[in-house]
Amino acid sequence: MPRTSISFERGFYPSAGLVGPTRVPNSAIDGQNILFLGPNLMKSAKGIGGGPGIPGGKRLYLVGSKIGVVDGDGSVVAYTRDSYFYVSSGQTTVGNLVLPSSNGALRFYYNGQSYNAGLPAPPVPTLVAGATGTSTGKYAIVITRKRTVSNGESNPSPRSNVLDVKAKKVRINFPPAPALNSPDYHDKWGVYARPVNSPNNGPYLLLKDVDVAITSIELDWDDGDLAALEPPTDHDPPPMGKFVIALGGTLVVLGTFGGAMTDVHAGVSPSLFNQPDAFPPSLTTYLNPQESIIGLAGGAEGEYYIWTKNSLQALLATSSPEAPVQVRTIWSKQGIQSPHGGCFANSEFYAFTGKAGPVRLGAGFEPDTVFALPVREWIRKLGWNAANVVVGYDPVYDAIVYMHGNIALAYMRSLGIWSCPILLNAVGTAKAALTFEGALLIGVGNGIFEWEAGNGLPQDWFITPAWQEAPRSGDRCTITGYRVCGDLAGTQLKSELLIDFSDTPAYTLTDTQPGAHYTDWTHINKRCRAFTIKHSGKGSDHYIYDTEIEMLYPGAIREKK
């Protein structure tokens, strides 16, 4: 008697038709909590569980070897071990370390202290004659602020008064310094002097650094004591912004220079190379089109992707000191609306857009949606809101996971197929994702969980293959039996024969035998034009390997019209 097997090699394909030329054989038209792991190999999903045990938030980042969480807009990057630069509008954490909100300012955390990044030019110092000494002539200086922990130095102060002395020491009175626990704290003054008797001409050259605890100091010096180092003139503090990234040896504050009449913040403001406290205004460039940033993702070395409501743009590190960051527009008319609406899988970028749904970056940088044809209409009917979609990469199964609310839909990259939707078995909805230490972490509700690391709580799963037809469409056939090969670890398998597009089973097979095995053949006699066999169970790591059907097809038995 002829036998046939039901295959799932086309994966989850709910957008296919039921019969005729729109039908997609060897696919699943419905299902829940099922992952496809190989050709015709499926297993029931574990769901999410475990995780790092820290609170979640709106945004997740890889910060050195730790997880960064920003509960609002903003980002955080590692500088040196246990020191960080960050911009945020809400609470920011790195591991278990809580950083205070920066309210849009770039801040630097080091050794228990949070500083404002960048150093403003100090007020003017004053010079007076001191005790008897060797200094003779006209003297003038400027001073800078210096912060050792970030290798930062400010622009110089205005020039001091000109002091004309003879055989005296020069006393330098410094302006008041910020307190030790102040976010503007710096630990040294840089003292720069012009050549003696040239208070209005010539360069300022480094005389010495002075500890900030010293309020005044008396010195003797002549031109031979000056080092050939001039104070910086382009070390402006960073502008206010929305995000910060590390790119090619610079820090880049993103979303800077929003106008008074608009809420658009499209500036891209890099620091000088290896000078994270120095942000020359001349280096700022702008996104094109100029829109406020919604999200960002790091790609290859020296590259970041930035997305707005209507665009996708790349920031590229250059070797030019005059333009260390280049902005390149990738998509100018299609954007990503969710903070975690895009991610990299190795060098391939995937996203979810309001216009196209699931999309990836094509070889020519065009939006490629062909891979999403099996599920795009299904997603549209469910009404997924692009502003709430989270996209993450799971390297364990090489899967791009699209999440909306409590539903996750995984595209299996290596297989080129979709798995059935998986319910996120946790309280709350998905709002963030991060690939961390070889696993996909998902922010759900107020927690962070690991993909496919469920705690073993039983989950209902089912899978319905595409409807099967007689060899000639419209003919009738007779199902005389079927059997299933699977492994449900001793829990109950239910396999229901459905015929002629009815949800009511024409026959139900149940099995509880442990281990991988074939069930006994059923003995039935069901005549139909179309049929399928729906499998279901309760639990994780259950496998269905094969479904065999015995069928009689006399031929030319047409359905009466």
Image: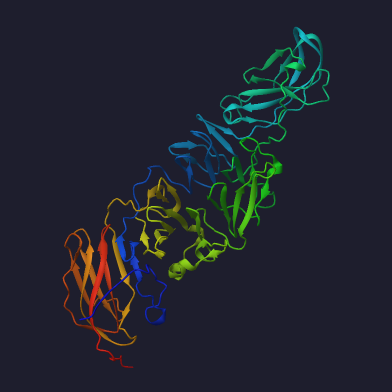
Percent position of residue 109, x then y = 53, 33
Residue at 24%, 88% (x, y): give it: 554
Instruction: Depth check: give the residue in front, 380 or 550.
Output: 550
Asked if 9 appears above or below 429 in the picture, the reply is: below
Residue 318 in view: yes
Quadrant that contains the N terminus? bottom left
Count of labels in the image: 0
Percent position of residue 152, x then y = 62, 31
Q: Is residue 68 left or right of residue 364?
A: left
Asked if 108 appears above or below 289 in the picture, the reply is: above
Residue at 37%, 46% (x, y): give it: 51
Percent position of residue 385, x then y = 49, 62
Residue at 24%, 73% (x, y): give it: 548
Q: Is residue 122 left or right of residue 52?
A: right
Quadrant that contains the C terminus? bottom left
Residue 265 in view: no
Instruction: Depth check: give the residue in front, 201 or 455.
Output: 201
| Farthest bottom residue in view | 561
Q: Is residue 523 left or right of residue 139?
A: left
Instruction: Depth check: give the residue in front, 339 or 371.
Output: 371
Asked if 435 appears above or below 6 in the picture, the reply is: above
Residue at 31%, 84% (x, y): give it: 471
